[in-house]
Image (cartoon, coloured by chain):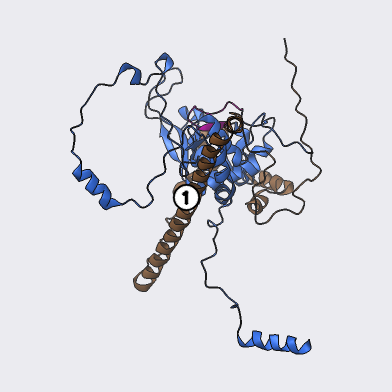
Amino acid sequence: MSLFARTGRLSLSRQQLLRAAAPAPVTGGSGDQRLEIIRRVLFEQPTRETPNLEGEALQQHETIERAWKLHQNQERERRNRELEKKFRKMSAAMNELEKTSDRLFKAAIVKSRHITFPREMKIPTETPSPQGWNHDYTPPVEVVPAKNS
Amino acid sequence: MALRLLAQRSLARAAPSHRLFSTGAVVASSHGLNRLKEHYHNIVAEDLMVLTYDHTKVSPPTLKNADLEALLNNAISEKVEEPVVVAPKVEEVRKRKGGKPLKPIQPLKNGSNIPTLDKITVHAMVKDAIHQKNHILSAFMALQSITATKPEVIFAKTSVANWKLREGMPIGVKVTLRGKEMYQFLDKLVEIVLPRLKEWHGLPMTSGDGNGNIGIGFPPSALALFPEIEGSFDMYPKMTGFDVVFNTTANTNAEGRLLLSGFNVPFKGAKTQTKK
């Protein structure tokens, strides 16, 4: 994704070049050439031919599709089983805690409505940047703006 | 000493204790290079289960291997009673203050109804399309290029005289994203567009429609931040504002916000970890 973003983002000079090459915007609606281009790209593209599979090739294709679906199904079931198991264990632990210590149980069921994942949480990538993490980062101190009255 | 070593070596050569390859279970593969989906299943889902746990609303465990025969015999042996229809008592009829529409009842918690992202709707209303239908083309193209899905045109349902809007006029475009495209769009939004928005510090902590769905509106300038549009910005005659609605399977706003923050969507006033 990040790679894609990098290629998708054009350099400034290239942007300026494109801007210069773009047709001058014509005000007045129907005369705009860009609309004509958009219309042609959107609706006048030739329909792509779908490959016509027959015989053994079709069988292979269907087998692969079925195997992939089966794999996905098994993965999903495995995940669900794992989560369900953990959930039941958690529930049992809470029941046990209720019997053991009233004070701890009360503390365990306290919830906040404004809870979020920390902003610093980074979604893992397969190609992380070597300079991607600022180890000396300190969160900014939030400044509450004074109310105008 | 050397002899013993030699003997050991020859023994190892004669009967290899392990094979060079394994024929065990297939290595757990990825979801087909879907980064956010993997992130959800590997990290977020479990945390959500713990964070949204409510001890007063735990559903009873379902029967894993139901003894069908015993159940059947039990059902046959017992007398079948005619269900008696009784009008519900006044206390049992659900009502909401002010005669507002009722909210759905929250289901009991278990391991399989952890909040997850259901769909993302990207919608743009083009007001200029009232005077000139051509203007909708630009929004159509823009939405198609940022979501990689063909949008649908929305026609006015009613006439509004003040806006000179008549019934049946094309007035907007909409894309509904699910599955792979949804996660890809969210990835782009979170990694590229949201960090580059000017003077925007995150979604408010009160956002949500009451049932766990969250929406954001974007100004026309935000459309140019998408990498697909940035490169060919001048080919679009008109930039339009658009809104993005995250439909989640969460039941409360708090759960919906928690889920979205798991995908790195920033929330205003969210606590940051203090460094020790």
Residue range highlighted in magenta: B205-218
According to the rendering, which colour does chain A have? brown
Quick one: which residue is furthest to the front in this view? A100
As displayed, is residue B226 above or below residue B240?
Answer: below
State the image coordinates of residue B54 (x, y, percent, origin top left).
51, 34
Q: Is residue B145 magenta?
A: no
Q: Residue at x 55, y 31 (%)?
A: B254
State the image coordinates of residue A13 (x, y, percent, origin top left).
74, 48
Residue located beneath label 1 in the image: A80
Overall secondary structure of the magenta stretch?
Answer: loop
Quick one: which residue is furthest to the right in this view? A136
Where residue B86 sits, quadrant-wise, is top left
State the image coordinates of residue B208 (x, y, percent, origin top left).
53, 29
Compared across the picture, whether A55 is left or right of A92 comes to: left
Q: Residue at x 41, y 40 (%)?
A: B60
Q: Is residue B211 magenta?
A: yes
As displayed, is residue B193 above or below residue A6?
Answer: above
Kindly identify the amino acid type of the residue bearing the numbered disc 1. Answer: Asn
State the image coordinates of residue A60 (x, y, percent, origin top left).
40, 70
Compared across the picture, whether B159 is left or right of A33 comes to: left
As displayed, is residue B54 above or below residue B93?
Answer: below
Image quadrant holding the N terminus of chain B, namely: bottom right
According to the rendering, which colour does chain B have? blue
In this orientation, which residue lies closer to the viewer: B141 or A90? A90
**Which structural element holds mark 1?**
helix
Image quadrant holding the C terminus of chain B, namely: top right
Compared across the picture, whether A2 is left or right of B41 comes to: right
Q: Residue at x 50, y 51 (%)?
A: A82
In this orientation, which residue lies closer to the viewer: B158 or B81? B81
